[in-house]
Image (spheres, helix red, strand yellow):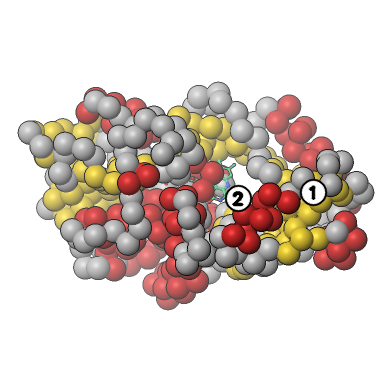
Amino acid sequence: MHDCLIIGGGVIGLSVAWELSRHGLSCAVLDQQAFGQESSWAGAGMLPPGNPAKAETCEERLRSHSHVLWPEWTAALREASGIDNGFRRDSAIEVRFGGEPGELDDEIRRWHSTGVACQPLTAAEARGLEPALGPGITSAYLLPEHGQVRNPRHVKALQAACAGAGVTLLPGTPVWEIVRQGGRVTRVETPAGGFSAGQYVVASGAWSERLLAPLGNAPWVRPLRGQMVLLSQLPCPLGRVINLGHRYLVPRGDGRVLVGSTEEDVGFDRRNTAEGVYGLLELARQVVPAMAQGTLERTWAGLRPRSIDGQPYLGRWPGLENLIVATGHHRAGLQLSPITAVLVGELVRGQEPRVDLHGFRPDRVGSD
Ligand SMILES: Cc1cc2nc3c(=O)[nH]c(=O)nc-3n(C[C@H](O)[C@H](O)[C@H](O)COP(=O)(O)OP(=O)(O)OC[C@H]3O[C@@H](n4cnc5c(N)ncnc54)[C@H](O)[C@@H]3O)c2cc1C
């Protein structure tokens, strides 16, 4: 019997398995399909910065701890897997076109008050850094410590590292039911039979509510579709990430530029729509007009695991001593995956988590 069984082999489940195996625990990861093919593959891999010394909110604490972990996490993963996940800190510009001057001042103040380097930019300065930016910039700032990771490579690296560490990887194994007896989970049921372990971790992304519902009081987790467009152009007109609120252009450094993303409440529908793709192409043309000449390589959509308040559910399931929930990471599951794995690892090993998990309780019904 394994020490821990993890349901879901996206970036969260695989990160947890790898972290536990690094501490000598035996794990199995079950996924209903191939590993890392859902939200974790579809995401953009952007990693916003944070500073644990100045973080005030529970979200800032989680983000900033993950920010600190990423370089070591990447190096250890490369050592274990031989795969370069493409992690780099290459800065980002937040920009607005045709808005009110000073529109971003509150955001700039917030970054400063949380101890994160943030440099206000005039339109000329923004264009000095990124000469291909389009006309009509009304406000902008630079985040020098912003990073990114090639998320499909990252999940491949996690999978290889887990395999190398002896983690039992069971793709194509959907968990149908979590079986409890009194205050403990005793096994999970799958088409391949029952599996038992000392502890269980639910990391099933947008499907987590469905899986947990029969236990009662399941956390609110719903899919939020995000469509993406991949353009390519050499030489690439863009050198760093450009953010416009929740939409962005992410240059991968090899001529490819991700353009994302939509936010659509359409259930488990992973289609691209004409309207979604059209809107993203328009965005690309507005932000970097030269991208209109780029090649349209590919489109896809993914299902973000949205929570009730945008924060993940992290912690022990009330009333079941050996069940831990790590889900609902919404727009931030890649950036938060290292700290999530470390915190779940601490819970599994019976240690006090280094970040207060009160604001992430699985049984909360709204924001704290
Ligand atoms: C378009 C888009 C852009 C994004 N951009 C970013 C970004 O820039 N930065 C960032 O940090 N985050 C980003 N995200 C969010 C991020 O991708 C997610 O928060 C993260 O991938 C969630 O990881 P996960 O492992 O919880 O979920 P998933 O990757 O969805 O994995 C869940 C896994 O559980 C499996 N599963 C479900 N039910 C069962 C079951 N019953 N039995 C067995 N297996 C099961 C599924 O098959 C799946 O493989 C983006 C997401 C999208 C869609």
Q: Amino acid at mark 2?
A: Ala
Q: Which residue is mark 1?
A: 102
Q: Which residue is mark 2?
A: 44
Q: Amino acid at mark 1?
A: Gly
75, above or below 31, in the image: below
State which quadrant residue 188 falls in: top left
Relative to 216, is 147 on the left or the right?
A: right
Position in image of residue 70 (x %, y %): 48, 66
Extreme left residue here? 182
Position in image of residue 348 (x %, y %): 22, 56
Relative to 345, is 279 on the left or the right?
A: right
Seen from the viewer's position, the closer of residues 125 and 147 is: 125
Residue at 45% from the left image edge and 42% from the top image edge: 311
Q: Secondary structure at mark 2?
A: loop
Instruction: Mark 2: give few (<14), some (14-19) or many (20+) Cα within 10 Å.
Output: many
Relative to 275, is 136 on the left or the right?
A: right
Determine if the C-beta at disc 2 is less than 8 A from ligand 1.
yes
125, above or below 135, in the image: below
